[in-house]
Image (cartoon, rainbow, N blue to C red):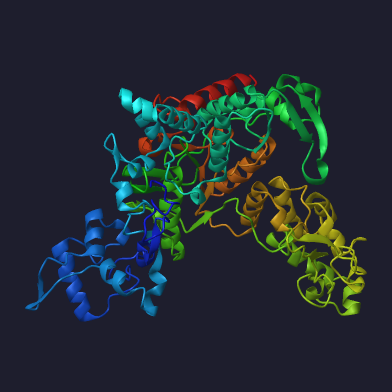
Amino acid sequence: CFSFNHQQGMCQVCEGLGLGQGVDRERVVVPHLSVREGAIRAWGPVQDPAFNRLLSVAGEALGFSLDTPYAALAPEARRALLYGAPEQQLTVENLGFRYAGVLPPLDEYASTSKRHRHLLGQVPCSACEGSRLKTDSRAVYLRDKSIVQVARMPIAESLSFFRDMHLHERERDIAGELLQEIRTRLGFLDRVGLGYIDLARRAATLSGGEAQRIRLASQIGSGLTGVLYLLDEPTIGLHPRDNARLLDALNSLKDLGNTIVLVEHDRDTLEGADHIVDLGPGAGSEGGNLVAAGMPSQLDNGRQSLTSAYLRGELHIPVPANRRKRRNGQLVVRGARQHNLKNIDVPIPLGRLVCVTGVSGSGKSSLVESVLFNALANELHKANRPVGEHDQIDGVEHIDKVIHIDQTPIGHSPRSTPATVMGVFDLMRQLYADLPDAKVAGFAAGRFSFNKPGGRCETCEGLGQRCIEMHFLPDVWVECDHCRGQRYTPEVLRVQFKGHSIADVLQMRVRDALVLCENIPRIRKRLQIMEDVGLGYMSLGQSSTTLSGGEAQRLKLAAELCRPDTGQTLYILDEPTTGLHLADIECLLAVLHRLVDAGNTMVVIEHNMDVIKTADHLIDLGPEGGDQGGTLVAAGAPEKVAQSRQSHTGRILADVLRRDKKARPA
């Protein structure tokens, strides 16, 4: 009766989904526009004189302005605009009317109106209010809490609720063992750093790291022994404060007689391991060898091991001797209250590297992505993004562009390559078209494209490989037996530059192509940027679909460095160090600082202390996650935040800065 997956417990209207089709408020409203400018999509710009008079009277009576951007309206004014006051009689030119708002009328006829069908979306079920359960199930209370209220608590809060629950003797006989099992399972989730997540949260909204830690918690509770567990970067999205708790959880699994194998870059996790297997020494074709193996303290026998050098302190990312001075102008996010943000004002200095820090669930993504990025994208680029709740953002006139660079794949087509993303391939095709052999044969630049008929192998259509459908198994890609993976016809391959066909160039690493094109400035510049961001090992013709998240992000950064720069761009990155080795992080930081040195502003959400300690300005949210987060705990230079006793980031940063100072040569 208490399961939304069972007929006896599920809401009969939404069938246990908690969602139904209705008017989506985020699709109805354009936050950066005023009502008169067209903030309400169903109305458009208010141009009709009669309708304008009606709205003006309603706005004056109910407290909303037609000329203020929707995002800047007070919550009460927004509510009055959207839901109206149908019980209140208003008068205009001796005629009485009632203002019914925006959403109630749309709810009535949007589903049958083709004109407004685009405003429909998934909204909480009106019958069960998104709880998924029927009324009878929601009417049962335990210590004044329904199952819906408990499920909507953060895990840490629900753990306290059940720990503090005292049962009478008869209740203990009925539910004593069950209560202990609930406490144990919630405790496992809290131990792996998930105390800020609601129990009712949908699995599809979890990050990869969160989902992996939930599976880890379930395994700790299973009590299995003799199992080999493989985890890929379980520390993703985890604040350093919680690393020790995660390691304790992993050690609990190990102590049961299991073996834990991690793919990991986090320094604390590496130092806490019993055995390290280090592969390399480089990446791509320069890797694949066993460089070092053993306990962390024994890795010094691996002289080629970059991991060993960083762990021993021979290599390290230094704290900048001087941090950038604040330039004129700043952005100020005012009244941010999206999700758990507590109506905070957050200044963001421009022309600096700004790190937004805080424990998991403290409100970082809500502030930076839901509020800051979406609002600026709408205002500067006329985007149509749902903006998190806030009052306004001051200082937008100081920037002309906002760019979000994440680790999502660059493309879904195997035809996308690093050479095409960087614009190198177009220059290469023109280079080959200008060669004497190409001119004699009458080949233009299009002849050297593997995406167009003419010069490409038509058997594989320029892919160099063919897909064999396996029906009930994943498709298999094999080398094209006609062109042998070369992509082109023999006639095109006969045109060569310094003894290399264009197919040879696509198979080259970036650093080899850099040597080949050292006397061609336009090509050399783009290849040098790729080398600078640590992608020198990458093949120019490698499919973009095979790139890791970190490689995709650095390739996007390299492409940005190739574009003309105004020096007034705001870049936003969310945990760019995910999947990066310490040596890769050093390359990434060089690129970020290069963009900031050009006058741009970089806002980075990050947990990695090597990035945090090199920032010019920190914004630390917290102090905890979930309901206990969402406040501005500390802000300023890293040295200032390190002095904050309330900041978890500050306490860890103080130790990092202290160690770095000792390691610094006199």
Q: Is residue 470 above or below residue 458?
A: above
The residue drawn where x is 25% and y is 54% is 75
Position in image of residue 620 (x %, y %): 43, 36
Asked whether, in this view, residue 427 is left or right of residue 386, the answer is right
Q: Is residue 337 above or below residue 507?
A: above
The residue drawn where x is 38% and y is 30% is 175
From the image, which quarter does the C terminus lie in? top right
Residue 565 visible in this rendered orientation of the protein = yes
The residue drawn where x is 31% and y is 44% is 343
Q: Is residue 136 above or below residue 68?
A: above
Residue 600 visible in this rendered orientation of the protein = no
Foreground: 637 or 461?
A: 461
Position in image of residue 352 (x %, y %): 50, 43
Foreground: 549 or 353?
A: 549
Position in image of residue 396 (x %, y %): 40, 55
- State the image quarter where residue 597 is shown: top right
Asked whether, in this view, residue 490 is left or right of residue 588, the answer is right
- State the image quarter where residue 375 is shown: bottom left
Asked whether, in this view, residue 291 is left or right of residue 17, the answer is right
Position in image of residue 152 (x %, y %): 37, 43
Q: Is residue 493 above or below residue 165?
A: below
Foreground: 486 or 396?
A: 486
Foreground: 102 or 551?
A: 102
| In the image, farthest residue toward the left | 94
The residue drawn where x is 30% and y is 62% is 69
Q: How many marks?
A: 0
